[in-house]
Amino acid sequence: MEKYLLIALFSPLVGSLFAALFGAKPKRLLTGIVTSALLFVSLISSLILLVHIASSDDIVRVKLFDWITVGSLNIPFGFVADQVSVIMMVTVTTVSALVHVYSIGYMEHDKGFNRFFSYLSAFVFSMMVLVMSDNFAGLFIGWEGVGLCSWLLIGFWYHKKDETRDINPSISPSWAANEAFIMNRIADLGMLLGLFLIYWHVGSLQYDVVFAHVDLLNIGLVTLIGIFLFIGAMGKSAQFPLHTWLADAMEGPTPVSALIHAATMVTAGVYLVVRAFPIYSQIPDIGFFIASLGAFVAVFAASMALVNTDLKRIIAYSTLSQLGYMFVAGGLGAYWIALFHLMTHAFFKALLFLGAGNVMHAMNDELNIFKMGGLHKVMKYTAILMIIASLALAGIYPFAGFFSKDKILEVAFDSQHYILWFMLWLGAGMTAFYSFRLIMLVFFGEERYKKYGFHPHEAHWYMLLAMAPLAILAIIAGFFEESFEHFVTKILPEYHFHVHGIVTVALIGVTTLIALSGIAFAIYKYSKGGFSEKWKEHPIYKLLYNQYYIPIIYEKVFTEPYKELSKIAWKELDLRVVDATVDFIANVVYKSGFAGRVVQSGNLSKMLRWMVIGLLVLIVLVIVYSPVR
Amino acid sequence: MITLTHYLVLAAILFSIALVGILRRKNLLMLFFATEIALNAVNIAFSAISKYYGDLTGQLFAFFIVAIAASEVAVGLGLLIIWYKRRGTIDLDSLQSMNG
């Protein structure tokens, strides 16, 4: 079985290196096909591992070599496929393999075709390292690897110029890439501190060792570790207040948004909380904080999605909001439910993004949904696929989102956090509304695109074919709930519900009701031409449309003072102290050289004099330092 | 009685004269004379010490120096004559083409 683990891990790397060989060359279809094929190899290996582990409960471990051995620090390069990581492996490889195939069509006219596939496969490799590592150091390497690939891919069209927007200080792919990278760097510092604390007090970074020792540690220390690790998770999963990068990351190509900023990388934070459950189950207070923050983000992000006019940003906010749901489940101790929602969300959100990619392609990269409308006539299949994804997102039976999201609401109600439950319930209504607002504005109603001279067309057949498995999974994944629970709770703790029967049914009913009414409201309102223009003047609309003015506040509070500080540091410190010191040293050398230049007169007689002086000096030295007899 | 000291003092005096010549003379030919004096001062010292210790190595060395000095003068004078033919002077201050 070790063989399959290594194949699953390294075939994306091989694909990436292969595509990198053609990095600067013009488009070769071969790179896309080879990387996609290798991703399918990885997917099949992961599935074999899944079947193996499910049938025999045998956890597969591989230790490649000792990586860092210094003093008592010993970090092997080890990988593990257990019930949790194999679920992540299958989710990641499924979505990435399909996104690779989709990208062959999406990127077909792009100059950087080969480069794109190289980055994309490198991302998958980093993600596999992240989920498969058997120690925190390996996880951190993968964590940084996905951060790097995310930077490369958000900034893929780095040549685009900065443009000023009313809702954002400035935006361009390279700006967004830097923002994402810097935000993550801030959070990663927290994570590193957490890892240092673990190593300092446990003496190892292996999951097994650390989790076995957690009980013995001081509770204050465990709390501190939990906080620091969660700060790392907040950055990667774009939780408030480090959330602004995710919406801006939509500057990258759409397959990237589907793979990295919806399905896989942003869920790494949730994975970390799930993976470190022995730490978090020790500290329910921090867990409650995580859950509260998650619930807040769920509503906060959903409210921004309500009014946004940018196709991809709406979906990005929806991702943010769903990550909030996952953190609620993780924080309240229902780790398997968090993982379950992570998986189902990966399927339907990737589907939604790829659908958005089709729409963008059809509309020549136009993103304003108010310039679309009535597209279902020309893009029938895309419309169907996106409606499936939106139904799953809204949590309608029998789609996948119903099972996972409802479970999270049940957990919130069951653990008697009624406020959290209410927020999530509200969020569910908003989710349903904005999803169908998007569907209505893009696919139905008046054909506004004609006015702007667009000629939309359906995407390639293989792009739709790549989306089909995701659509099927978005429909049926929920029915695996029981076997999923049975499978992952071999490692993760079970969650015991206290409420049963009629209350559960009532909860499901209430949640479904608000989701359905959200959908109905959206359909009713937007089939009649939407809200009136007067709403745009309303302060609440403005607040939401400007993302609560948070990007502007960050610009004013952090970026501009930092710029000022940098200027001071440049003019006062760098120019006056550092440069002056260096210049002084250089001047001394230069001037002494200039003064010493007279020696090299070329006059033999003068040179001889210098020689004699040297000789005399040497004689004096010999006399002075010779041992006295 | 002439002792080793006398020889060594003579050698030292000769060497000093040679050194002054090297420092002061501007004529290339005189510079050669000065170097010859310096070499021979050393030869005197070598021979005297060799006699004093009863060891022939010093005298042997003096012979070598004489031979080397002879060939050095031969080469040096040859170059000097060519130089004089080209420039018409052997004054040291005119030899400054290596000025940095």
Image: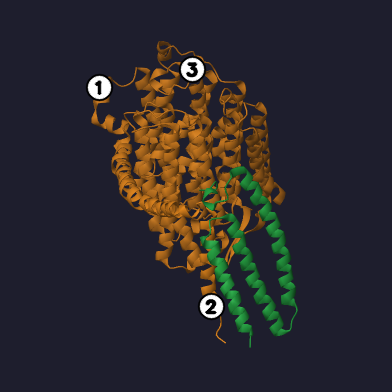
Chain colours: A orange, B green
Residue sitting at 66 percent across and 75 percent down? B44
Reading the chain from its start, which is encountered first: label 2 or label 1?
A: 1
Whole-number angstrom distance, CA of label 3 to CA of label 1 = 29 Å
Which dot, 2 or 1, sits closer to the camera?
A: 2
Q: Amino acid at mark 1?
A: Lys
Mark 2 element type:
helix
Chain of the residue displaying label 2: A
Q: Which residue is mark 3?
A: A376
Callout 1 environment at 10 Å: few (<14), some (14 to 19), or many (20+)? Answer: few
- Left or right: where A573 falls relative to A39: left
Q: Which residue is mark 2?
A: A623
**What is the total number of numbered labels drawn onto the structure image?**
3
Pick the front one: B24 or A297: B24
Pick the front one: A456 or A571: A571
Q: Amino acid at mark 2?
A: Ile
Q: Are marks 3 and 1 on the same chain?
A: yes
Residue A103 numbered mark, or none: none
Which dot, 3 or 1, sits closer to the camera?
A: 1
Reading the chain from its start, which is encountered first: label 3 or label 1?
A: 3
Whole-number angstrom distance, CA of label 3 to CA of label 2 = 104 Å
Q: Amino acid at mark 3?
A: His
Tell me where residue A286 appears, x and y as whole percent: 39, 56
Q: Which residue is mark 1?
A: A534
The answer to the question of whether label 3 and label 2 lie on touching residues, with beta carbons closer than 8 A, is no
Whether residue A460 is situated above or below residue A56 in the rendered picture: above
Tell me where residue A449 appears, x and y as whole percent: 42, 14
Pick the front one: A505 or A563: A563
Tell me where residue B11 appears, x and y as whole percent: 61, 75
Tell me where residue A284 appears, x and y as whole percent: 41, 58
Pick the front one: A162 or A387: A162
